[in-house]
Image: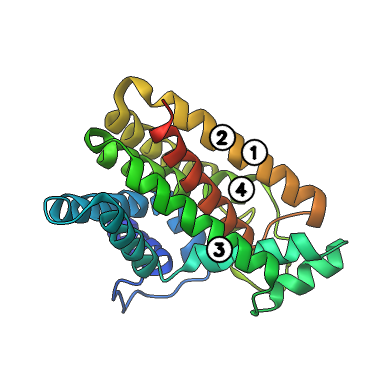
Amino acid sequence: MKRAFRELLVAFQFLTRLPISHVPYEPDSLSRSTKFFPVVGLFIGLSASLLQRLLTPHLNRALVALLVLTFLVLITGALHEDALADVADAFGGGWNREQIVTILKDSRIGSYGALALIISMLARLLLLSTLPMNRFMAVVLSAHVLCQWTALPLSYFLRPAREDAGQGARIAERISLASFAIGTLLSLAIVAYALQREFWIPLLVTFAVTTLSGVYYYRRIGGITGDCFGATNQLTEIAVYLCGVWS
């Protein structure tokens, strides 16, 4: 139980900017913590939903959506936004594996990355502002649980594209079947409870986004990097929001 709690803290420490410290370091602590990524997503989604409920009586929907989106960026430290920009630059500007990997290592943002960030932020802002009020919490909870879950199958089935460094090398092909199964069951339970009969729609969409992006990464660079995890995370969040507003 104590070890599981430490792994949960590692998951929060990695995925959020919450002031968590004094967690004992172990070489495989991050890979073992992946099963709790959906739990972190649950916390993030629940926090954003509570903020939306507090603000809704006082502000119009567009402003509420903007503040909720700002909260989401701040609590995660723009971790996945940065990854999306890097992936857009690398795969948009690189013609072969070597070029793509080189661009992924570059911290500067180019035109592809800037456009990806603008589209991502605008899409989430519009979708959050148009989500049905009676389903806002259920959809946002599910979106953040599922987008965090995508790291599990990607890291279980794909090898690291760069063996030398990076967050991808710390978890790719290093999570156990047990961690994969636990994280998946947790995600299914949370989403099924939140969305009731409609839970299967975002599940299928998440599976499609994860599978297609994973196949794309494998064909282009032969594996996955930490930025690839973040890019799929962002795409999944947007896709689940879209499911929530689709009529």
Observer-side mark, 4 or 2, equals: 2
Q: Are marks 1 and 2 in contact (CB under 8 Å)?
A: yes
Residue beneath disc 1? 211
Q: CA distance from mark 1 to mark 4?
A: 8 Å
Q: CA distance from mark 4 to mark 2?
A: 11 Å
In the picture, measured across the screen, residue 181 lies left or right of residue 198, that is right
Q: Earlier in the sequence, mark 1 or mark 3?
A: 3
Q: Secondary structure at mark 1?
A: helix
Res. 205 in view:
yes
Q: CA distance from mark 3 to mark 4?
A: 22 Å
Q: Are marks 3 and 2 in contact (CB under 8 Å)?
A: no
Circle on res. 154: 4
Q: Tell me which amino acid carries mark 4.
A: Leu
Residue at image point 64% right, 53% down: 173
In the picture, measured across the screen, residue 50 lies left or right of residue 228, that is left
Q: Position of residue 245 (x, y in %)?
A: 39, 34
Q: Tell me which amino acid carries mark 2.
A: Phe
Q: Tell me which amino acid carries mark 1.
A: Thr
Label 3 Cα neighbours within 10 Å, binned few <14 / some 14-19 / many ≥20: many
Q: CA distance from mark 1 to mark 3?
A: 22 Å
Q: Secondary structure at mark 3?
A: helix
Residue beneath disc 3? 117
Q: Tell me which amino acid carries mark 3.
A: Leu
Residue at image point 17% right, 51% down: 56
Q: CA distance from mark 1 to mark 2?
A: 6 Å
Residue beneath disc 2? 207
Instruction: Residue 199: name its quadrant.
Output: top left
Q: Earlier in the sequence, mark 3 or mark 4?
A: 3
Q: Position of residue 108 (x, y in %)?
A: 65, 80
Furthest residue in direction right, as rendered: 96
Residue at image point 46% right, 38% down: 242
User: In the rendered view of the protein, which quadrant contains the C terminus?
Assistant: top left
